């Protein structure tokens, strides 16, 4: 017992005395079962104490890292410039408790997303929720059904959209409105059966606030009713 910490030594000795007294009145199997339960309880308590101490030291160690000595406001600006990668945003929020607190406390960091950088639609939903009610910027040139669903679900908050045009996107977005969309870039991959693409007039009429429109390898009817608020138009072709 000389190598056992004093508090644990006293506890073990007390339990041994109780064990010896109990042996005279209770069957040995029951006594051993009781001792095993007590040892498990002690082990769990010491494990919890060890885990708490370890977390405390880890938090203090993270605060000692040079970058974490920067003001939280400056760190939040650095996080905003991480770009539109959903994976990078989630990694930042999972690095340490300090970074998570800063990331979750600045919703603007979560208002831009490239849907092509995430595979799980629930991750996209989580990112957009963290952006609270701020307008969103979205980009996607690699569509699947789940990403199209994310687009449709967030149309009402979209302020900027850069996307490739496919028949699936067209069918899903028909008769849907994006009331605050100001900047729109549409490109059509050369290898899709839509090329050259004609964007139908109802698509633009659902975007009353549109100010900037960039078209790459696609065409659309130009009527004054579709471009009342348009300030800049760019038409490009790489065919």
Image (tube, rainbow, N blue to C red):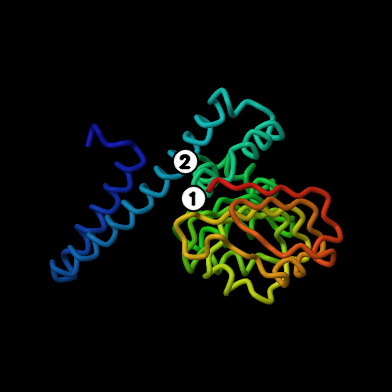
Q: For numbered disc 1, what is the local secondary structure?
A: helix
Residue furthest out toward the bottom: 175
Left or right, 217 with reference to 181 = left
The image quadrant of residue 199 is: bottom right
> Of the numbered discs in the image, which one, if any, rests on residue 117?
1
- What residue is rendered at 83% in x and 50% in y? 231
Q: For numbered disc 2, what is the local secondary structure?
A: helix
Q: Number of numbered discs present?
A: 2
Left or right, 173 with reference to 91 = right
Q: Nearer the viewer, residue 162 or 56?
A: 162
Question: Can you give x and y, in whole percent of width and height, for residue 106 in the image?
Answer: 69, 46
What residue is disc 2 on? 55
Left or right, 62 with reference to 222 = left
Query: Mark 1 or mark 2, which is nearer to you?
Result: 1
Q: Quadrant of the N terminus?
A: top left
Q: Nearer the viewer, residue 128 or 227?
A: 227
Residue furthest out toward the top: 66
The image quadrant of residue 93 is: top right
> Of the numbered discs in the image, which one, if any, rests on residue 108?
none
Q: Quick one: label 1, few (<14), some, or many (20+) residues within 10 Å? A: some
Question: Can you give x and y, in whole percent of width and height, for residue 104 in the image?
Answer: 63, 49
Residue furthest out toward the left: 28
CB under 8 Å between discs 1 and 2: no
Q: Quick one: label 2, few (<14), some, or many (20+) residues within 10 Å? A: few
Instruction: Calculate the distance from the C-alpha at mark 1 to the C-alpha at mark 2.
Output: 32 Å
- What residue is rendered at 52% in x and 65% in y? 194
Q: Which of 110 and 177 is in front in this view?
A: 177
Task: Please report whichever mark, 1 or 2, sits nearer to the chain's N-terminal start.
Answer: 2
- What residue is rendered at 41% in x and 49% in y? 48
Question: Can you give x and y, in whole percent of width and height, for residue 189 in the image?
Answer: 50, 55
Question: Can you give x and y, in whole percent of width and height, for residue 85 in the image?
Answer: 53, 46
């Amino acid at each position: 017992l000389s190598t056992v910490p004093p508090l644990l030594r006293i506890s073990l000795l007390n339990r041994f005395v109780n064990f010896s007294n109990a042996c005279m009145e209770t069957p040995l199997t029951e006594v051993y079962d009781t001792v095993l339960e007590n040892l498990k309880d002690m082990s769990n308590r010491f494990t919890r104490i060890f885990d708490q101490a370890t977390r405390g030291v880890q938090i203090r160690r993270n605060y000692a890292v040079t970058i974490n000595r920067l003001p939280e406001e400056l760190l939040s600006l650095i996080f905003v410039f991480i770009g539109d990668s959903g994976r990078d945003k989630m990694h930042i929020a999972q690095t340490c408790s300090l970074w998570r607190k800063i990331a979750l406390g600045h919703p603007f960091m979560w208002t831009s997303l490239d849907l092509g950088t995430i595979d799980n639609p629930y991750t996209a939903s989580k990112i957009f929720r963290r952006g609270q009610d701020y307008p969103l910027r979205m980009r996607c040139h690699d569509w699947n059904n789940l990403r199209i669903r994310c687009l449709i679900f967030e149309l009402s908050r979209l302020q900027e959209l850069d996307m490739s045009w496919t028949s699936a996107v067209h069918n899903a977005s028909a008769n849907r409105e994006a009331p605050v969309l100001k900047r729109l870039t549409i490109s059509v991959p050369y290898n899709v059966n839509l090329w050259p693409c004609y964007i139908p007039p109802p698509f633009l009429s659902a975007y009353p606030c549109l100010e900037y429109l960039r078209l790459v390898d696609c065409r659309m009817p130009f009527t004054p009713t579709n471009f009342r608020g348009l300030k800049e138009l760019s038409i490009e072709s790489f065919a």
